[in-house]
Image (cartoon, coloured by chain):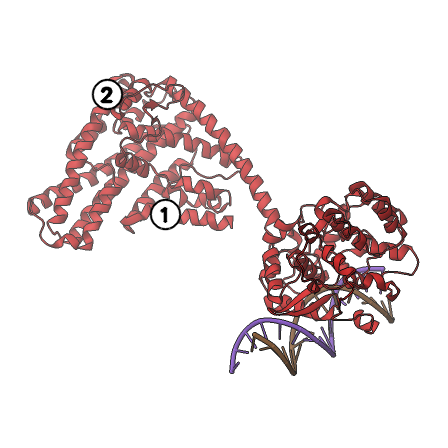
Chain colours: A red, B brown, C purple
Amino acid sequence: MMQESGTETKSNGSAIQNGSSGGSHLLECGSLREGRSNGETPAVDIGAADLAHVQQQQQQALQVARQLLLQQQQQQQVSGLKSPKRNDKQPALQVPVSVAMMTPQVITPQQMQQILQQQVLSPQQLQVLLQQQQALMLQQQLQEFYKKQQEQLQLQLLQQQHAGKQPKEQQQVATQQLAFQQQLLQMQQLQQQHLLSLQRQGLLTIQPGQPALPLQPLAQGMIPTELQQLWKEVTSAHTAEETTGNNHSSLDLTTTCVSSSAPSKTSLIMNPHASTNGQLSVHTPKRESLSHEEHPHSHPLYGHGVCKWPGCEAVCEDFQSFLKHLNSEHALDDRSTAQCRVQMQVVQQLELQLAKDKERLQAMMTHLHVKSTEPKAAPQPLNLVSSVTLSKSASEASPQSLPHTPTTPTAPLTPVTQGPSVITTTSMHTVGPIRRRYSDKYNVPISSADIAQNQEFYKNAEVRPPFTYASLIRQAILESPEKQLTLNEIYNWFTRMFAYFRRNAATWKNAVRHNLSLHKCFVRVENVKGAVWTVDEVEFQKRRPQKISGNPSLIKNMQSSHAYCTPLNAALQASIAENSIPLYTTASMGNPTLGNLASAIREELNGAMEHTNSNESDSSPGRSPMQAVHPVHVKEEPLDPEEAEGPLSLVTTANHSPDFDHDRDYEDEPVNEDME
DNA sequence: TTATAACTAAACAAAT
DNA sequence: TATTTGTTTAGTTATA
């Protein structure tokens, strides 16, 4: 799942990158990847080769820009400022518009001149400029100028579009603009890489012996917002390296379509952890600068009239003043760089924390999300703690031990804890006997399997519940307000309560019907609405006596646990201890808690007592008084709400009803029929 | 090895 | 007529 999302993020990033520019933008990605791939290598030292490379890139960009400008001038001469005619609806018009939208830096001749000037500056001159504060002011001026020029060029582009130019020409222009934009972005990437390498060295110190870096000249060509973005990129890149180094794979925060398409990043993108961060990765410098232009007054460092630079909080009346403040107070100096590093550490810590939490979440999801095809990875119910249980589960998890259906996952065992924890307050609505194959091997009481406690687990995990069909059917019926359900309602309960039963419906529904028909404990009742199914508790208890063989101490422990957990009176205790007489009398106390608990206890003890005491058991026909339980449906009068809550309350009232009639008189039926 | 419980599958009939 | 519901039988597996 995470892998898919990770891949999806990757593709989304590309999709966003491509956007409306279509395949032409892939070129940008390709070129950017080339530039980025260079940056993948640790550029700790910035040597002459790097400088030469940057200059080469700039030269290429300039060449493209020159061609673009020439063609634009020619097109303007041809098209002039003709009023738009009829081609407004031509689809081709969208191409230049989209390009204009995605190219925040439409280069004007003046800007080209500026770039040319930068190009001819020697490193020494650039270093001088680096030391001059006027450079920042120049940037601001350039920014304003740049905006004006951009608006002008966009206007020209629109006019060209309305002039009805051929789509091919427009596309050509757009492509050329795009190519130039790519060159600029490459330059930006290189700048970022240099900054990053400087960052590694510490506060932009320049190695001795190296020529003056083209950093500042390159930065001069950027507007302040781009500088901000640059720092952002630096921060992200640093963090990404840290996380990558830690194998947290949180990804390349500097990822653009560039790095995301870089082969070396593929594995990271495929990493589940990369999904979330992958969303961050789509923030390309281009998009950032674009968003800043689209929302000129939205700046990560500006909000509510306050500069959000760490430790600043200077009040800026408007955005322009903020920009001035930003450029003056938070210029590219040691102090700002140090603050940036602090912020980087903060982000880094947060990233690490996020990575840890992600791992935790992943582990939780891995634990809870059980695939039916991964039986050994099946999670356990929340209350499974017994090592015996776990070992048992491991053995059960083997494919050989699950021959029934290939899709049958490991049945999580219900708690088989010993002693006082056998019956808990949450086991009021016990399902009852679970599948014996999972329970009796270790001679521990398991009927306290608590569906309520693991309810959420089974609702979400496609794990076969370790209960028999009969137990589940009984539980479904007892949970219903009327203690009766139609077959379809039983179906619905199964699907509602267990994710496992949301598939292979034909199989388990057939099993449900089979169990309803097979077991006498399920009584079919005809009423005006149709047929409903009820539970005959006595029959249910007779159906499967639980055996706890040869462990009296355990039984004693169970009894003590019952006393420990409940306020059962001495008579009840004596009754329990004496034999396995069904505890309907407890339900008749009118205390639903006691009634429910008695039900649970009875389930626990019936088999045990049956085994430890004499051969007499409640399955013996001799205990007919307790078996004279009328099904629920006979009760027509309104129920006492308190009694109705207990599974046995209705049975209790029916127990003493003199005029019940048996739908199925099990006493008259052959024993072997009941025993299958 | 045997008996038993549980499960699955299937056939069949009746009801809806 | 198709689907649902209910019954029954047969075979398999796990366990004591």
Q: Residue A424's quadrant in the figure?
A: top right
Residue in the image at 42% along x and 47% along y: A10
Q: Label 2 amino acid?
A: Met
Judged from the image, the secondary structure of the residue bearing numbered disc 2 is helix
Please name the residue that numbered disc 2 is placed on.
A137
Q: Please state the chain letter of the residue tagged with numbered disc 2 in the rendered image.
A: A
> In the rendered view, does A11 fall on the left or right side of A502?
left
Q: Label 1 amino acid?
A: Ser
Q: Which part of the image, by quadrant, shows the C terminus of chain A?
A: bottom right
List x then y, in percent, for residue A456. 61, 49
List x then y, in percent, for residue A655. 78, 60
Answer whether residue A203 is visible to the viewer in this image: no
Judged from the image, the secondary structure of the residue bearing numbered disc 1 is helix
List x then y, in percent, for residue A457. 62, 50
List x then y, in percent, for residue A665. 78, 71
Please name the residue that numbered disc 1 is placed on.
A14
Answer whether residue A221 is visible to the viewer in this image: yes
Q: Residue A115's quadrant in the figure?
A: top left
Q: Residue A525's quadrant in the figure?
A: bottom right
